Amino acid sequence: MTYQNYSLKQLQQIDAAHHLHPFTDHKELREAGSRMITHAEGPFIYDSEGTELLDGMAGLWCVNVGYGRDELAEAAYAQMKEMPYYNSFFKCSTPTPVLLSKKLAELAPRNINQVFYGSSGSESNDTALRLVRHYWALEGKPEKNRIISRKMAYHGSTVAGTSLGGMEGMHQQLGGAVPNIVHVMMPYAYELALPGESDDDFGLRAARSVEDAILEAGADNVAAFIGEPIMGAGGVKIPPASYWPEIQRICRKYDVLLMLDEVITGYGRTGEWFAAQTFGIEADTITTAKALTSGYQPLSALLVGDRIASTLVEKGGEFYHGYTYSGHPVACAVALKNIEIIEREGLVERVKTDTGPYFAQMLKERIARHGLVGEVRSVGLMGAIEIVRDKATKERFSPGGSAAVVVRDHAIANGMMMRATGDSMILSPPLIWTRATIDMAGDRILKALDLAEADLRKA
């Protein structure tokens, strides 16, 4: 029996009876009933009632080539027929992760030539943490194990991912984080810049909070700094141009490894294959997932720099870490085909030279003028809209985050899938968006803002 044999109400009842959703208030969801997304095509998703929604989030930051790609389904089917699964243990491999590793090494920054696979970004950040600490132990410095992260960072939802991240609510529910991880200020100028402070000066100050944390702990005790090139789930917070060069300088000065989390920004989002290339960052590890397969299969890839990899190979012995599905042959086959599509259609270059600049123009010329909008910001096809009560003073609606939820609900009701994070509306659309799609998004966002403003001002 297929889902078409059930009514929406029946599906909602079954969902409530048996399905625990991620990041959800389950009581609230079960009172309202979940929206059933049943099919999708190109840049659109459709629910069980036939409502068309322009997907402004590419699923969950991941469906870069859009929906309905027969080639990806066919790649999965062909691989399933030939070799549906075998593991990467017992000194074995299968062809697709071998070929995918070669391809990723070609696309990655020059100092990166090795790949370790998992099934999610959370898993790969676990791997990164394990690998970095193991590296320093192999180098005879096991005490060099502290990791510096940032407040409001998001690095996944496993125990290690939650610990690396800087979401206080997640820490409280965890009830005991992985030790020796500290969090410093985020590079969020809109809220944290001092009066009269330039963007460049703020970026330097935010970066030097990392240096302060290194000096406080002692450089001999600090293993690495981890950061998202652009803080995604924390609200698309884009650092000033001065930030990453200063972070790079600090890490090199104190011999601290640099871990990049590109689970969101990897595979074309910023107009380069990796945001490391957009911002000129030379990292020791780069965590990737999501758009590696455009979400068609669960797969993550930790890209490992030569410095760590050479020590692991030459001094390592056995690395006691891995997953049943590391290098899953079907997921890797889909990733290879997904990368082929992105290359063939020139999507990365299109984001860099056409749709990315046009998206930024739409936000600045149309959305930023609205009475609810304090700031817009974007890089490539990744953007945020700050919702405020007063544009001049940056005063927020109270309680914090409530206004963005009102905007989100009006957006969805008017055919635009957007995400509310704190007081920000965030966008991360499929890379197949065109100028016409961006114009459509602008129209729907403005309508949602108008309707939300009427509700919020009245309240």
Image: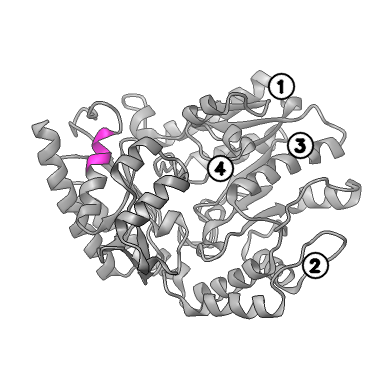
Please name the amino acid that badge 1 sits on. Answer: Gly
Q: Nearer the viewer, mark 1 or mark 3?
A: 3
Left or right: 376 as drawn, with respect to 192: left
Q: Quadrant of residue 129?
A: top right
Is 404 within the magenta?
Answer: yes
Q: Which residue bears the numbered disc 1?
A: 218
Q: Nearer the viewer, mark 4 or mark 3?
A: 4
In the drawing, what numbered circle is on residue 93? 2
Is 123 within the magenta?
Answer: no
Residue 372 image position (x, y, % from top left): 18, 39
Task: Give the answer, above or below, for where 11 lies relative to 259.
Answer: below
Please name the amino acid that badge 2 sits on. Answer: Ser
- Within-10-Å neighbours for mark 1: few <14, some 14–19, many 20+: few
Q: Nearer the viewer, mark 4 or mark 1?
A: 4
Mark 1: secondary structure: loop
Q: Nearer the viewer, mark 2 or mark 3?
A: 2
Q: Which residue bears the numbered disc 3?
A: 133
